[in-house]
Image (cartoon, coloured by chain):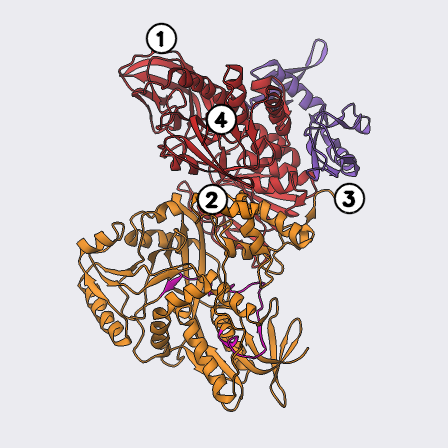
Amino acid sequence: MVREYTCIMCPLGCGLRTETRQGERGEEILVTGNTCPKGKEYAVQELTDPQRNIATSVLVSGGELPLASVRLTHAIPKDRIFDVMGEIRKRKLTAPVKAKEIVIENVLGLGSDVIATKDIGKI
Amino acid sequence: MRQTDVVIIGGGPAGLAAAVRLWEKGVRDILILEREHFLGGILRQCIHDGFGLTRFGETLSGPEYAGRFIDQVLEMGIPYLTDITVIDISADRKVTASSRDGILEIQAKAVALTMGCRERTRGAIGIPGQRPAGIYTAGVAQSYINLQNKMVGREAVILGSGDIGMIMARRMTLEGAHVQAVFEVQPYASGLPRNIEQCLNDYGIPLYLSHTVTDIKGAERLEAVVVSQVDECMQPVLGTEREYCCDTLILSVGLIPENELSLAAGVELDSRSKGAVVDENHQTSVSGIFAAGNVLQVHDLVDFVSMEAESLADSVVRYLEEGRLATCMLAVKTDANVTHAIPQKISGGEDFKLSLRVRRPVKNAFIRLSQNGNIILEKKMPKAIPAEMIQIPVKARKLNKESDLEVSVVW
Amino acid sequence: MAGFDVVIIGAGVVGSAVARELSRYQVRVAVLEKELDVACGNSGRNTGMLHAGFTYKPGTLKAECAVEGNQEFDQVAGELQVPFRRTGKVVVGFNDHDRENLLKYKAVGEQNGVRGMRMIDKEELNRLDSSAGGEFAMYVPDSGILDPMQYTIALAENACQNGVEFYFNSRVVAVERLEEGYLVKTEKGEFPARWVINCAGMYAPEISEMLGYPNYPTKGFKGEYFVLDKKAGKHLGIPVYPAPNDKGGFSTHATPTIDGNVLVGPDSYVTEGREDYAATKEHLDGLIADGKKMFKHMKREYFIRNFAGIRWKRYNPQTGEILDFLLEADENRPNTVNLVGIESPGITCALPLARRVVKIVAEREQLEPNPDFNPCRKGIRKYIEMGTEEKKAAIAENPDYGEVVCRCENVSRAEILQAIHNPLGVHTVTGIKNRTRATMGRCQGGYCETRITKMIEEELGIPPEEVRYSKENGYMFTGKVREDV
């Protein structure tokens, strides 16, 4: 089976092609079109279990700004994005917030933390 | 009047990187002037990740990327002022700025222009139709959503496939809005392929090339947009109109370097890049005034903005030491396949980095640099697209000091 | 609600002028406006020209009022602090037919009492403005430019300061005749009044009918405009009009605005929609072609905005003939004044028309002068127009002047605050824009709109979803991204 992807690991955006076939040691995935090893890794991941990072915001009370920006420390399965958004939406922080601060640890048991990416000073 | 060695206009990624590099090279009498309450510029609202891979070898969100430089500025104790707007710069480098504390007038030895860029608007592209509420440029929507906690709409259409537009398509989708489609008037996307993939394809948002908004409906709040296909001359094709009911139209139709202050100082602008004409030292047509980052040319990656500003800082250090920099006499000329190239002037005696964009997507092409018919170098490009800035280091030893440099795309 | 002596329907330039002139007397006046601000219709959708009056048929109300309004305007602008400049105007020609028309209208102008018109050759034309197109021209020294929005705001604010009450979001749906006076019904409330004055602009025929006058037929002549960057404005110092056509109408012209931009337009075509202000591709393309003839620096990179306005002209449906402004007061409908078909030059004619309205009222009853009437209104002092030393003094006195909110037009926080707390109580983003020019520059609010909406919320203590762009249902936000739960 042949599939095509656009690599998102860097701005180059290589056009990747995966070919799955039965080899001597079972199923093999052949990747072409990548410029670097990350691209190969991405293509295999994308074929087997696509994962993404997300960035959004958490409500902050008593801060210089109403929101603290957050992201995940690791990518999560693509089909869990909106579940994680739901968890983040429930959370509320109190200023001060420091960048790198863990907002939700191991969100939904997916092995990824939600961390703040911005300092929010107290008013 | 206050005297300062280097005044940096703008505390965004370019200004911060320039300040840090200047400090590292021993320049202490620096002043960054930032009009916002915080340092960091536009990166503060770019909360998505993907920044820093080139500069730091890891992928960061916008605030984190800016934070790296802000932390250094604070650690080093580099002087800066926020909540202050520069309202004038003169050709003899007198900077006038306005704040709640009054009017600050500074005589600078060198001025770094690092003001960034602004978004092209509905008026500039002349979209017909009514003028309801609900039409936002992508950056304005981003500011409302990411900084001010205000949702701009629920049912959106996006015009223009610039990176910020695609990023806002994903951002609004994550926040529960429905983004119907992205329309691009050109036959190719203007943003990066990875954003088409992770911002549009991931969320099932279609991208229609060679389409544009030809009518806007709604007397009070936006009610619908009419979209038409366009022909090779970008003219709408009659009979292809389709109406999309929506309450929000996001425009991502281009960025323009913000050079109002540069013009006040008498800096010559390039009608192609819309930024200053600079030489290999990033010096503009006015001695002692330098430009880098999006105010010079719109970049697609902030990493290159920082690196351009660091290179500017290196030149400013030499300028301060030597009192002036020699005028560069050779022009950098481009052919019709190149949108613009920076720098526009070189000496032929120094290494420099050439930045350029191709006018349309090309495959298996060469970027050819030549002087007086002699090829200096050729860079092979398996694919080149307008969305991606191409940077080519050029060595002085390959250049002569007599002939203009010609840049062409051949295939 | 206690009764009003006078209810004025419509807060365009004419309604506001009538309100201001009535506020010289001891009368209780209400102005009812369907929109959220003054000048939302065609009062704000025009070239901003103080017309001299050389194209109007001698003896008409139009001609009379235009000349009167033109010649008194220096005083009016001074009293009301309206940005105004008597630039003069060149009406340019290319051929013999144009010359004939120009001479014809020069004679008309002279008959109307327009001062100082003269024909000039190409050399003098180029001396006056090197960017003007044309082979020769008629020079009209009395023409001027003003900001029509600011003028209407100034009239209304002055009226308001002198006691007139303004009711916005109050569309008149019926006028009932009472035993004594009238009951003016709006969507929001009822206003008993002894006098009713119809200043409803494009809706004047409908109001006319409600008052018991005929529903006069009017025809809408729509015109579109481009607004050009101040960078283009540097090239143009004087309005450049093409020679009028045989009917005295002008096609696309180039006019510097009082703020330093350039307007290119309007073209002219008939529309059916009362508020059909949508721009069309066909006409915008046409403006580009025609604009170049008048203004050599017409370039796409200068475009910052476009808009449209409609001149609703009264006409004779049998002959098609365009009719004069109508100002009438019928004995059978006592204590009403009906103004219909007031279009261009309505800005120039507003105060002369208003005085004629007051005269009608004064003929019926004794008007006692308002001892507190003050003809002067203070405008918002602009930071951009101050010199460095003035800026320093202004900031020392009020630090809000030092905080630049709109970077293109250098509008300070002090000005935005004054605009938010304007005497008329207007709170829309567009209202702030029209009072300060914030968001009107080349970035069109890219930088300052987020700041202005935040200031509106903070100053008025309202949630984001209550901020309005310009109309009642023109909400800016659907709510918060993150609600506090």
Q: Is residue B250 above or below residue B49?
A: below
Q: Pointer 3: what residue?
A: C484
Classify 10 Å Cα crowding around label 3: few (below 14), some (14-19), many (20 and above).
few
Q: Tell which chain the image draws in red.
A: B
Disc nearer the start of the sequence (3/2): 2
Q: CA distance from mark 4 to mark 1?
A: 28 Å
Q: Determine the main secondary structure of the stretch shown in magenta.
A: loop
Q: CA distance from mark 3 to mark 2?
A: 36 Å
Measured from the top left, where is residue B305 in percent x and y?
Answer: 51, 25
Measured from the top left, where is residue A96 in percent x and y?
Answer: 74, 32
The answer to whether C402 appears left or right of C464 in the picture is left
Q: Tell which chain the image draws in purple.
A: A
- For the residue pair B129 and C328, the one nearer the viewer reads as C328
Does residue C195 appear anywhere in the picture?
yes
Q: Is residue C115 above or below residue A33?
A: below
Subunit of label 4: B
In terms of secondary structure, where does tag 2 sit?
loop
Disc nearer the start of the sequence (4/1): 4
Measured from the top left, where is residue C154 in percent x and y?
Answer: 49, 64
Of the 4 image quadrants, the one containing the C terminus of chain B is: top left
In terms of secondary structure, where does tag 1 sit?
helix
Q: Pointer 4: what residue?
A: B388
Whether labels 4 and 1 belong to a single chain: the reply is yes
In this rendering, the label closer to the viewer, 3 or 4: 3
In this rendering, the label closer to the viewer, 4 or 2: 2
Q: Pointer 1: what residue?
A: B397
Q: Are marks 1 and 3 in contact (CB under 8 Å)?
A: no
Q: Is residue C248 above or below residue B332?
A: below
Whether labels 3 and 4 belong to a single chain: the reply is no
